[in-house]
Image (spheres, coloured by chain):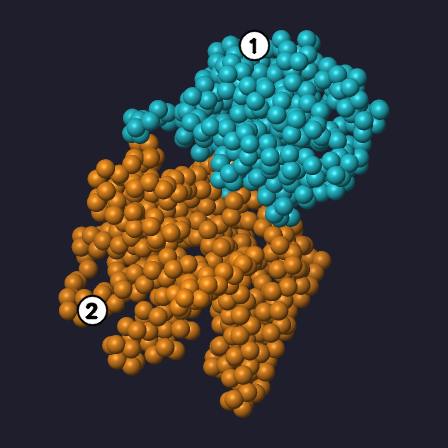
Amino acid sequence: MHLKQSLIIAIAFSFLGLASWELFWRSEGKMPDLDDDKNLWAVQRAKVNKLTKSDVLLMGSSRVLFDIQLNEWESETGVRPIQLASAGASPLPIFHDIVNNTDFNGTVIVGVTPGLFFSTTYPGAGPWKRAQSRVEYYQNRTYAQRLNHWLSLPLQKNLALVSTTEEGWSDDIDLKSLLGTIQLENRLEKPIFPPFYNFGDIDQDRNMQMTQKTVNDTAFANTVKLVWKTIVTSNDQPPEREATTSFFADDAKKFKAKDGNLILVYCPASGLFKEGETKFFKTSEFWDKLILQTGKKGYHYEDYEQLKNLDCPEWSHLSAKDAKYFTTELIKIMKIDGALSHSKTN
Amino acid sequence: MLFNSLSFIVFLLLVLALYYLKIFNWTSKKRMLLIASYVFYGLWNPPLVILLWISTVVDWTAGNKLAVEENSRKRKLWLLLSLFVNLGFLAFFKYGNFLLDNFTVAIHAIGINFEPQPMDIILPMGISFYTFQTMSYTIDMYHKKIKPARTFLDFALYVTFFPQLVAGPIVRAQDLISQFYEEKKATVNQFIWGVFLLTIGLFQKVVLADTLLADTSDTVFGSKEILHGLDAWTGTLAFSGQIFFDFAGYSTCAIGIALMLGINLPDNFRYPYASIGFSDLWKRWHISLSSWLRDYLYIPLGGNKNGITRMYAALMITMLLGGLWHGAAWTFVIWGALHGLYLIIERLLRTRIHIKINSFNGVLLAILTYTLVNFTWVFFRAREFSTAKNMINSMFFMNTDGIKILQSFEIIKVFILISLLFICHWFMRNTSMKTVSQKISPILLGIVWAMMLFLIAISQGSGEQFIYFQF
């Protein structure tokens, strides 16, 4: 057997193949990026155990992830917050975990995206499961998984070809995702879910920004809008306002007993989301009652002149530029209000 | 630690570097391999390494006592101690909740209302593999079939050798411990062949099992609906491929990694889906387990030496326990029972019908065997009997108005892949990968190898665990 010859050919050809693959995807506009996966989240969650009273935790859904910018927060307050928001998820399981499994008693900012916040307390439901699965992953992750994540970071940062995601975006380039784009005859008696492309870039401490393509390319932004429309119109589950509010209020009470500072934030929405939230999640019925029941400070973007007219390119999240503005203005408002009483600058 | 993970690549490179650098003598190299094996296991859950230590110390002590003790009663006690500890671990960690559930059902049946709290027990990875491996040592020592391991280090390494620690092959003491006595070093060709086997194993796991088949199988078996027959068949075939590629992939990796260290591990799979009948299947599927069950269960139960009825009873008990070995659920017992039934029917038919196998009837019988195997996989994969029942009904096309949940491409993909799998097994059933590799040109082998490496890299396996780790 001439195995040496075979090995040399295998190494040479696979290297050539992978180099060509990398160059091809870069020429298609795919650049190396980090995946906002359970590992990245768990690393941030692990930091909570070492935080002090002056520290800040952010949690919520994707709006908090996109709209609150960590650099701006740090430069305005001197504290870099820990970003624990999770896209498409209810913040309730994560807040529950922080309140019940840690001694943290600094400031917690909870984003309220009504469709997710008030959705459910049922463990099997999507918005709950997405958040809870991250909490459980953090609790159960092995040393091998931590090591794998640590080793994968330089690869993710430098190679486009390893750009795959836990979310399963339609523009992922791993083999499974590429095969998933092949559509033959539709056998199913239901419409095909529209393609859902990634529209944000995240860094190692989970600071997320909307891509420029989403801001500048209306056709691309429309693909995201179509996905939102499909999700919203196909959702036949009524909100569970009382159950979710009461669950959250119980944890808020425990957090207050620890002398923690809880702040609720309602981030901007536009178009279909703004209309839907106005119609189905009336402020007086949902937001106001939540604030009343928790007895905490709340900031609704519509209550502030400088925030109420911000536009979301795909209806639900701010562009990077507007997110920076939103963060800065929000902190100014909070400071005037004395809401950040735990923060270093106060 | 998983073979298909970045941490394992780094781990293996470090181990190989330390193994082949001329800084250690053979004993130190074995110590290094032993420590590396504990790290390999401990990176998953460090405290559970203690179970490995207990098994090692108990079986080492029992083995030494059995080597010198002549009193048959005391010999039996030493054997029982080893079995009690190993089977005790299995009973507690693997079957604790299952036993409790069944006890509760039985208590309810006699009218006593007892609701115990479920026990929060972690299943130690690969516990069924390493307990069976260590038990084989003390049983063989009891029967005076083998000599005791020369040193504790050799024995500890036999119990813990990282390539096959968590999912086999289950290696017998005489096949592995004796390899640790003399310094081992892979030749260049052995080393490269080991790398090739590692590549094939990863390709089977990452590309074929995880990327191409797992989702289809998960979708079908995760569905609560009554499915269309085509969907049920596609899901079952996908699982049959997934479990083969997952498990055979792990075994191939293990054999390849060991070979890179100059250690030979036995084959665990020999193209099982081209088996002609179920006796043939069990000589080709998970060979190290089936031979273990044959030698330590079927033969002690009487085997075929005490008449036909006893033989069938022994066969059925062996397969039922073999089913239970795979998991603590009645669905696994049914899986074992079906295999036992198939084996009994086959033996009955063989006494009455004599067929000379040629390539035409051979392939038809292989297809029939594979089809029947697929029905058993339904019970193996389904978490509940209701799911299995619905699937079986759908596979007999009894649910004519069943729901369609798979897209056309998924069905075509699975059928093409499974057809290729079957054809490959059929043409390879009387040969080996090494023989075929020797016949083809090294350039072609290199290109195929490169394609596998490329596909592994672009598949981006998520590093989730191998199916058999849970057994």
Q: Which residue is mark 1?
A: A216
Asked if marks 2 and 1 fall on the same chain, the answer is: no
Residue B443 in sight: no
Q: Chain A appears what colour?
A: cyan
Badge 1 density bin: few <14, some 14–19, many ≥20, Cα 10 Å: few
The percent coordinates of residue B188 (x first, y second) are 54, 53
Q: Amino acid at mark 2?
A: Leu
Q: Chain of mark 1?
A: A
User: Which of B100/A214 is in front?
Assistant: B100
Residue B395 in sight: yes
User: Which of A10/B233 is in front?
Assistant: B233
Q: In the image, which disc is placed on residue A293?
A: none
Q: Amino acid at mark 1?
A: Asn
The percent coordinates of residue B268 (x first, y second) are 42, 59
Residue at the spot 49% in from the left edge and 40% down from the top edge: A124
The percent coordinates of residue B47 (x first, y second) are 65, 59
Q: Chain B appears what colour?
A: orange
Instruction: Determine whether A342 is above or below B163 in the image.
Output: above
